């Protein structure tokens, strides 16, 4: 069922969608001016900007709830902020990340609408918190009288299953307040979660912000060109390398901007040194191609990207611990505890006896298909992933690994090591490993806590290499 | 006026008496800290206490100083990072195309699993940032727990930024506070009369980070709307006019004024503008830093929310994030959700690693320029280092261990009063010795004699020890410096030549003897040293001199070696000067590794050339010397009167024998190092007679205070101690110390039986053995002798029950082995005495006789073994446990036989066995293991005991 208004391709609103009418009238010239300014700043967003301006209409004009959705890094929040800045209208911004609870959210909306300056004398507290939603609504009735006020609600997907969304959408009906509600979400309205509690509400006006195309991304990057940069060369770099190579990996402006700014000095170097003239595009391409390929190989999104391309690698290169396979320090016992946890989480408990009890080895009769069955079971267990294990099993495996290591080095455990294995320090290290998220306490009763091992295969291999334990001898996934 | 009374009034007397009482009580407390030792008066005990305070305070303050300054460099880098990423409001508005959402984040790797060392690291960082003018807040992981919202963290940040006790927990409150901070200077600038005073007042409260803020100063702030976000320009402000109403753009005025400022400021000179900005926008120039401690322990979704909130508000509140981590950046990358990671503009910083910190503690505090009056023996140091490396990587724990060792030493050693004077020169030492009681002065003397034949005084012995300690410390530093020169001795790695390992290793007697590890390592080090180039060797000589200067009285103790070092250095310098005069060829030759020193030998060496003939040299070529001997011979050229080696080698070389005869500088340095190390590390100073008053030898005390092993203690109490030890009802302290109760005698018996089995035991078998223990009384001595040689030959199922030598087997307490007939009886009695109502383990236990009889030899064997406990049971039951009540005694054929001739009914045994099992389960020693081979089993949980 289609209810309410939808946006036409040209950005015009359908007949009943805009109570305040379209942008025709005295403010048209100003709106056009604003629109052109915004469109020049936000490439490839003309349709969306026009649509938003249409819905906003004249100052003090009523507007339907506006629902803006689109993927990350598509400019939703930034454009809305910019539009309000350009229009010179004040608005209240509320992030649903910050106010997850309905009452807190309504209280935040109320605080924005009242707009009172928070004072240090009051400890920067806002209005007193209402205990019930109804109280909030009563307060809103008083607060939202007068000229039109706008509330921008970001990350609405966080409250999509909450009752408060329906309340917000019916705010004007419930309180009579002149409030313009703009909802921003990364999830489209069409999903059931949004429509679950909002069946009786008027459907908001939907505007979609699609992802940028590569050409659009390059235009945005050109706009954010750093000062003092040769515009022609920078554009060349963007069109030759950033667009074809990096923009296919990530559409985040920040990532591409960072890569462009890191690569630009290298790209410019032959020109600056006078080896290649700036006009020789092909030569520049050939000279820079290998570096760009190497940079692309190291390119990943987000935090990883920053750390792999930044100077962190240089900082870490000097670390002596890298020689030992680990880039961080762990006490000896902690390493064995992690290995023991890894073994416990991969092997079935029944295997422990066969692994660690010498009297069990070789005494088992095996059928002709046993090997195949075992391989199948191992593959299945590997697919199923690690499982939980009790503390006592961890301690037992820990001791066995320590003992095996001692045997390997020709050292038998003495009374001191027995004592160490039962010392409170070992248990303390388990709690340290839990707080560091190497282990996590999964389930279990008070007397027998169970743990899960969060150590990846790669890290376990590195730890095993560090303490000279052959992990293959202990992990069978059976 | 009243005249002053001639005698003290009652009130005055009372007060005086109270003061005296307090002083006496305080002295008593002090004396209790130092128990009385032989021949000591209270004054002597107080002297020991004073010496302890002096020594430990000195050492502790030194350690504290090192710890405080360990991370200063990284802190400065962090501060510059924070300043670099701080943008004042005016800058933000002028640069942004869209809105800035990248949040600068310093990923600070603290390097170490144990967070107790870093409990103070991040608070220190915060206080340093505050002292440098930043607004800094520390967020604990508990503020970002799974049960709390992001508001908890925001409230914590606001409280620390504003120093207000507030309940506000949203970003708007933070923004309102920051707005106040930014605007106040503007207002003060507008009101110059009141401005300076208010500013000074605020600087006193906020910059230093102490004291409540001046609320009154903020009351006159112009009321502005707090809910609006972005800034319309001046034109739009003029046009929108009434539209904004009370909801006028929050920072519109400041933005307008900024815009105007920008226009006007373009015409102003840069310096003036900067000065004006600094004066007027001091608060806006102060960076805002949020430090999150132990990030891994925080709930990642809460952390993600905080990052997103701060990122969205970055345009209004330019916060920089410092994420403190214990492991590595890679770990955070795996944990942090992508949404949060995407908005971080991260850079990695590393704090000092735990091993490096330990290394610097050893280098600067324990072997540094100051002697703190105490030294530590090998056992103590070895325990502390092992504990550090194996368990916690915790420098604080290491330090605590030193303190415990120190305190125990002063509490137990009467000569420890000398320690305070040990580092203060000979006169102070002699005075301290004189102050000792005569008997103690005699104790300290070792009975050795000087060359003059006179017995050395205690003060002289201590002086000798201190001299030896200095030389020992310098030798250690030399080895470490040499190791670092050849790429070994890395503190962070697993290198045995790192200073902390050398320090502990060389404290062991025999470290430098033939079988000692030190000699072998030294040998390997010297082999590598020989490959150094002359230039590297020359640098090493400089390091040697620095090392000697960095140790307390090091230059004095190493005077002869330092002279040799200086000679070698001078020789090299002269050679280099000569080579530079001759031409570039010489310098090229010098650079190649292993080449001979181009310099001519020093005159002292040249005069000894004749002592080694060519034939001797040729013999040496035929049967080459060992590396160490060769190195020794080379070194002896410079030091011994024998003078062999270098001159002859040079001669051989000059005669074209094709041997590299001239020793390189590196060889000579290696020889020098080897000789010095052998000489000074031969005897650890802590073992010298003069070290009695200085050396802390209380490793047991340190172990007992630092390493808690409650399970092990209970295991020992149950498995090894005589039951009478903890069953003694009259000594509750003993039982408390052992961690078991007197009523756990049955549990001890059951536990010892359990140790005879493998990992798991069927309950029925176990109970059979338990019953047999009580039946063994009936076994007469003759039969016991017959069966003494009986031993179960069949291998048990599961792991062979060979116990560790330190663990007691129950057979230890079972001199009499049961007879076969008795084993049969053991089966018979319980079978007939099966209890009617039993539940759980009890029911299993009650089934024992039938099951064990039907199954065969398992229970019989256990019973045979267990029956031998009869002898020990006599004492045990006589002393501690009341014999089973006569009322409970059943007919003879239905009961086992008690220790005193009473027949214990099997019902009672079943109940007692059940209680014992519950006790063991409560202690965490056993657990139910379900059914195995149709038997209910229990599993032993203390795994190390099975070996």
Image (tube, coloured by chain):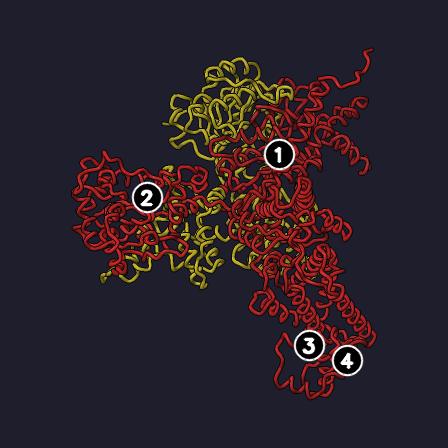
Chain colours: A yellow, B red
- CA–CA distance between discs 4 and 2? 80 Å
Mark 4 or 2 closer to N-term?
4
Q: Mark 3 lies on which chain?
A: B
Q: Are the residues flagged by discs 3 and 1 in contact, CB closer than 8 Å?
A: no
Near mark 3 (Cα within 10 A), the count class, few <14, some 14-19 or many ≥20, is many
- Label 2, on which residue? B927
Mark 3 or 2 closer to N-term?
3
Up-down relation of residue A467 to residue A205 (above or below): below
- Label 3, on which residue? B633
The residue lying toward the viewer, choosing from B935 and A111, is: B935
Near mark 1 (Cα within 10 A), the count class, few <14, some 14-19 or many ≥20, is many
Quadrant hosting residue B135: top right
The picture places residue B66, in percent across and down from the top left corner, at 67, 47
In the image, taking residue B746 as reference, residue B454 lies left or right, namely right
Near mark 4 (Cα within 10 A), the count class, few <14, some 14-19 or many ≥20, is many
In the image, taking residue A241 as reference, residue A232 lies left or right, namely right
Residue A244 seen in render? no
The answer to whether dots 4 and 3 both sit on one chain is yes
Q: Mark 2 lies on which chain?
A: B
Q: Are the residues flagged by discs 3 and 2 in contact, CB closer than 8 Å?
A: no
Mark 3 or 1 closer to N-term?
1
Residue B544 seen in render? yes
- CA–CA distance between discs 3 and 1? 64 Å
- Label 1, on which residue? B137
Q: Are the residues flagged by discs 4 and 2 in contact, CB closer than 8 Å?
A: no
In the rendered view of the protein, which quadrant contains the N terminus of chain B? top right
């Amino acid at each position: 069922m289609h209810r309410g208004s939808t946006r036409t391709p040209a950005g015009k609103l359908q007949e009943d969608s805009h109570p305040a009418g379209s942008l025709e009238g005295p403010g048209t010239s100003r709106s056009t001016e604003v629109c052109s300014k915004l469109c020049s700043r936000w490439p490839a967003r003309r349709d969306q900007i026009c649509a938003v301006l249409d819905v906003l209409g004249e100052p003090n004009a009523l507007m339907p709830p506006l629902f803006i959705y689109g993927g990350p890094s598509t400019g939703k929040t930034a454009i809305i902020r910019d539009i309000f800045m350009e229009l010179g209208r004040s608005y209240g911004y509320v992030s649903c990340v910050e106010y997850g609870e309905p009452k807190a959210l309504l209280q935040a909306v109320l605080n924005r609408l009242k707009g009172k300056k928070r004072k240090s004398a009051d400890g920067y507290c806002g209005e007193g918190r209402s205990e019930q939603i109804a109280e909030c609504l009563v307060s809103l009735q008083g607060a939202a009288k007068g000229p039109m006020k706008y509330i921008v609600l970001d990350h609405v997907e966080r409250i999509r299953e909450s009752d408060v969304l329906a309340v917000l959408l019916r705010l004007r009906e419930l309180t009579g307040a002149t409030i313009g509600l703009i909802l921003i979400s990364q999830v489209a309205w069409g999903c059931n979660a949004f429509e679950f509690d909002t069946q009786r509400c008027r459907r908001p006006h939907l505007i979609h912000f699609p992802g940028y195309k590569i050409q659009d991304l390059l235009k945005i990057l050109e706009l954010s060109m750093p000062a003092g940069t040769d515009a022609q060369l920078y554009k060349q770099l963007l069109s030759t390398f950033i667009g074809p190579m990096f923009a296919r990996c990530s559409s985040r402006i920040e990532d591409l901007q960072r890569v462009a700014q890191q690569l630009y000095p290298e790209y410019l170097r032959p020109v600056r040194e006078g080896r290649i003239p700036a006009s020789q595009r092909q030569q520049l391409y050939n000279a820079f191609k290998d570096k760009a390929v190497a940079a692309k190989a190291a390119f990943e999104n987000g935090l990883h990207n920053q750390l792999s391309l930044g100077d962190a690698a240089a900082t870490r290169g000097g670390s002596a611990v890298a020689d030992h396979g680990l880039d961080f320090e762990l006490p000896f016992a902690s390493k064995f505890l992690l290995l023991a946890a890894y073994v416990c989480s991969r092997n079935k408990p029944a295997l422990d006896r066969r692994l660690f009890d010498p009297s069990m080895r070789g005494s088992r009769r095996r059928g002709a298909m046993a090997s195949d069955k075992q391989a199948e079971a191992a593959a299945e267990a590997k697919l199923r992933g690690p499982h939980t294990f009790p503390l006592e099993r961890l301690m037992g495996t820990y001791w066995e690994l320590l003992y095996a290591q001692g045997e390997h080095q020709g050292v038998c455990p003495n009374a001191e090591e027995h004592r160490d294995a039962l010392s409170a320090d070992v248990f303390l290290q388990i709690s340290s490993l839990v707080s560091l998220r190497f282990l996590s306490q999964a389930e279990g009763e008070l007397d027998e806590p169970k743990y899960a091992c969060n150590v990846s295969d790669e890290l376990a291999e590195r730890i095993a290499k560090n303490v000279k334990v052959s992990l293959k001898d202990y992990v069978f996934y059976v | 006026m009243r005249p002053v009374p001639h005698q003290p009034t009652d009130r005055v007397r009372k007060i005086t008496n109270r003061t005296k009482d307090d002083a006496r009580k305080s002295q008593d407390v002090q004396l209790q800290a130092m128990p009385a030792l032989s021949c000591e008066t209270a004054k002597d005990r107080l002297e020991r206490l004073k010496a302890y305070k002096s020594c430990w305070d000195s050492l502790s303050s030194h350690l504290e100083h090192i710890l405080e300054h360990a991370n200063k460099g990284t802190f400065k880098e962090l501060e510059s990072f924070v300043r670099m990423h701080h943008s004042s409001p005016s800058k933000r508005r002028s640069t942004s195309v869209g809105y800035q959402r990248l949040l600068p984040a310093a990923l600070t790797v603290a390097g170490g699993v144990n967070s107790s060392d870093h409990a103070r690291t991040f608070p220190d960082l915060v206080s340093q940032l505050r002292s440098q003018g930043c607004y800094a807040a520390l967020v604990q992981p508990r503020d970002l727990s799974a049960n709390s919202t992001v508001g908890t963290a925001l409230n914590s940040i606001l409280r620390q930024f504003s120093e207000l006790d507030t309940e506000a927990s949203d970003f708007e409150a933070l923004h309102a506070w920051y707005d106040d901070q930014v605007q106040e200077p503007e207002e003060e600038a507008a009101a110059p009369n009141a401005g300076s005073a208010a500013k000074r007042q605020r600087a006193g409260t906020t910059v230093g980070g102490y004291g409540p803020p001046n609320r009154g100063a903020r009351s006159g702030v112009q009321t502005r709307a707090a809910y609006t976000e972005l800034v319309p320009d001046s034109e739009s402000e003029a046009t929108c006019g009434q539209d904004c109403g009370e909801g006028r753009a929050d920072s519109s005025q400041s933005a307008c004024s900024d815009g105007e400022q920008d226009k006007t400021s373009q015409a102003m000179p840069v310096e003036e503008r900067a000065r004006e900005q600094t004066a007027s926008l001091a608060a806006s120039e102060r960076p805002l830093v949020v430090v999150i401690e132990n990030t891994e322990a925080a709930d990642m979704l809460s952390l993600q929310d905080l990052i997103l909130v701060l990122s969205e508000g970055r345009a209004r509140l330019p916060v920089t994030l410092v994420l403190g981590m214990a492991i590595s950046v890679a770990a955070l990358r795996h944990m942090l959700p992508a949404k949060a990671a995407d908005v971080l503009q991260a850079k990695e910083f590393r704090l000092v690693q735990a091993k490096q910190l330990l290394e610097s503690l050893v280098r600067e505090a324990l072997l540094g320029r100051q002697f703190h009056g105490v030294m530590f023996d090998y056992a103590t140091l070895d325990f502390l280092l092992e504990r550090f490396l194996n368990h916690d990587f915790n420098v604080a724990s290491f330090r605590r261990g030193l303190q415990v060792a120190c305190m125990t030493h002063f509490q137990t050693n009467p000569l420890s009063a000398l320690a305070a004077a040990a580092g203060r020169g000979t006169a102070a030492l002699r005075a301290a010795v004189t102050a000792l009681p005569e008997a103690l002065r005699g104790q300290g003397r070792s009975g050795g004699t000087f060359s003059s034949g006179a017995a050395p005084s205690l003060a002289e012995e201590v002086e000798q020890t201190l001299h030896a300690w200095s030389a020992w410390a310098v030798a250690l530093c030399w080895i470490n410096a040499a190791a670092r020169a050849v790429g070994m001795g890395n503190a962070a790695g697993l290198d045995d030549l790192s200073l902390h390992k050398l320090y502990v290793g060389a404290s062991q007697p025999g470290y430098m003897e033939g079988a000692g590890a030190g000699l072998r390592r030294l040998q390997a080090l010297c082999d590598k040293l020989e490959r150094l180039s002359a230039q590297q060797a020359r640098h090493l000589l400089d390091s040697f001199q620095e090392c000697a200067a960095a140790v307390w009285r090091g230059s004095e103790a190493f005077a002869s070696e330092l002279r040799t070092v200086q000679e070698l250095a001078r020789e090299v310098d002269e050679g280099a000067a000569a080579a530079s005069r001759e031409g570039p060829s010489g310098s090229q030759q010098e650079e190649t590794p292993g080449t001979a020193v181009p310099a001519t030998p020093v005159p002292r060496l040249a005069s000894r050339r004749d002592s080694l003939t060519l034939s001797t040299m040729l013999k040496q070529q035929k049967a080459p010397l060992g590396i160490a001997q060769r190195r020794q011979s080379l070194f002896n050229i410079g030091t011994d009167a024998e003078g062999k080696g270098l001159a002859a080698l040079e001669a051989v070389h000059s005669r074209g024998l094709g041997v590299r005869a001239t020793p390189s500088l590196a060889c000579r340095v290696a020889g020098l190092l080897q000789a010095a190390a052998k000489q000074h590390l031969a005897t650890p100073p802590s073992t010298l007679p003069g070290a009695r008053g200085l050396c802390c030898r209380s490793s047991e005390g340190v172990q007992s205070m630092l390493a808690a092993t409650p399970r092990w203690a209970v295991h020992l109490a149950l498995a090894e101690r005589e039951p009478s030890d903890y069953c003694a009802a009259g000594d509750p302290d003993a039982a408390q110390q052992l961690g078991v109760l007197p009523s756990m005698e049955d549990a001890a018996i059951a536990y010892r039986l359990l140790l005879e089995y493998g990992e798991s035991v069927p309950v029925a078998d176990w109970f059979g053995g338990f019953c047999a223990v009580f039946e063994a009384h009936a076994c007469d001595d003759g039969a016991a002798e017959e069966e003494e040689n009986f031993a179960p030959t069949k291998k048990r199922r599961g792991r062979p029950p060979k116990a560790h030598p330190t663990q007691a087997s129950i057979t230890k307490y079972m001199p009499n082995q049961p007879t076969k007939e008795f084993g049969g009886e053991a089966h018979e009695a319980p079978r007939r005495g099966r209890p009617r109502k039993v539940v759980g383990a009890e029911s299993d236990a009650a089934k024992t006789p039938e099951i064990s009889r039907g199954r065969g030899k398992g229970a019989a064997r256990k019973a045979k073994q267990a029956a031998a406990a009869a002898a020990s049971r006599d004492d045990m039951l006589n002393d501690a446990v009341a014999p089973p009540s006569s009322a409970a005694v059943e007919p003879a054929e239905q009961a086992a036989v008690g220790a005193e001739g009473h027949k214990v009914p099997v019902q009672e045994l079943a109940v007692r066995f059940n209680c014992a099992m519950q006790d063991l389960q409560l202690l965490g020693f056993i657990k139910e293991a379900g059914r195995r081979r149709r038997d209910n089993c229990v599993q032993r949980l203390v795994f190390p005991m099975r070996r």
